[in-house]
Amino acid sequence: MTDGGRFVALGPGHLQSLMAIEQHSFASPWSEEDFLYLFADRSALCLGLMHTGELVAYALGYCDGRDFHLASLAVESESRRRGYASRLLQQIILQAQRRGADRCTLEVRAANRAALMLYDKTGFRSLEVRTAHYSGPRDDGIIMGRSIEIL
Ligand SMILES: CC(C)(COP(=O)(O)OP(=O)(O)OC[C@H]1O[C@@H](n2cnc3c(N)ncnc32)[C@H](O)[C@@H]1OP(=O)(O)O)[C@@H](O)C(=O)NCCC(=O)NCCS
């Protein structure tokens, strides 16, 4: 069930909270430089979800023509299964649509069951498998996509 919260546009001032979530969420976390690079990119959308004054989740991506590519999505570990990722996905897709995107793509590890379930539930379908695309640990990458013409 969704548990309140408000959306914020992320920037360098959120780096510390972002890094804390990132490092608990991924085997190969992004560096501060990776986030700063995206914040400076005019094609990027960097969206956070705050709850009781704390950043609890974020979604980041960039527009490439009519494609919006979701580059990262994570929820603070104690705040999962409350609908935050679903809400962020819906909101960032809406923002991408306002920028003219009509398709959203992403890549997910084949072993990431939670993310696969989330994306399946939010209308994404598998488009391609990239064998052994990930290392540490080794894993296939699944490219998923969905139309965002109709939300
Ligand atoms: C994947 C992740 C973003 C999901 O965030 P979340 O806020 O817990 O997701 P939601 O609460 O919006 O869940 C929506 C649906 O996704 C599915 N889902 C989410 N987590 C799940 C899990 N652990 N197991 C099975 N299904 C899950 C369910 O269908 C869920 O609906 P339900 O709760 O009504 O059953 C979160 O687990 C996370 O941050 N994981 C680490 C980072 C990561 O893997 N990011 C994705 C990279 S591609």
Image (cartoon, rainbow, N blue to C red):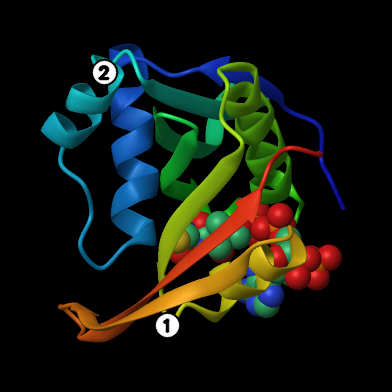
Instruction: Of the two numbered discs 2 and 1 on the same chain, state the one appearing first in sequence.
Output: 2
Taking the spot 26% from the left edge, 26% from the top edge, the residue there is 38
Horizontal and vertical percent for residue 1? 87, 53
Circle 2/circle 1 CB separation < 8 Å:
no
Horizontal and vertical percent for residue 70? 45, 45
For the residue pair 101 and 46, the one nearer the viewer reads as: 101
Quadrant of the image occupied by residue 39: top left
Quadrant of the image occupied by residue 64: top left
Q: Is residue 81 visible?
A: no
Q: Is residue 102 left or right of residue 41?
A: right
| Picture mark count | 2
Q: Is residue 107 above or below residue 99?
A: below
Q: Secondary structure under badge 1?
A: loop
The residue pinned by badge 1 equals 110
The residue pinned by badge 2 equals 41
Q: Is residue 2 left or right of residue 134?
A: right
Give the Cα separation between the discs numbered 2 and 1. Answer: 29 Å
Q: Is residue 132 left or right of residue 95?
A: left
Tell me which image quadrant ligand 1 sits in: bottom right
Horizontal and vertical percent for residue 62? 39, 31
Quadrant of the rendering where the C terminus is positioned: top right
Q: Secondary structure under badge 2?
A: loop
Kind of residue indicated by mark 2:
Asp
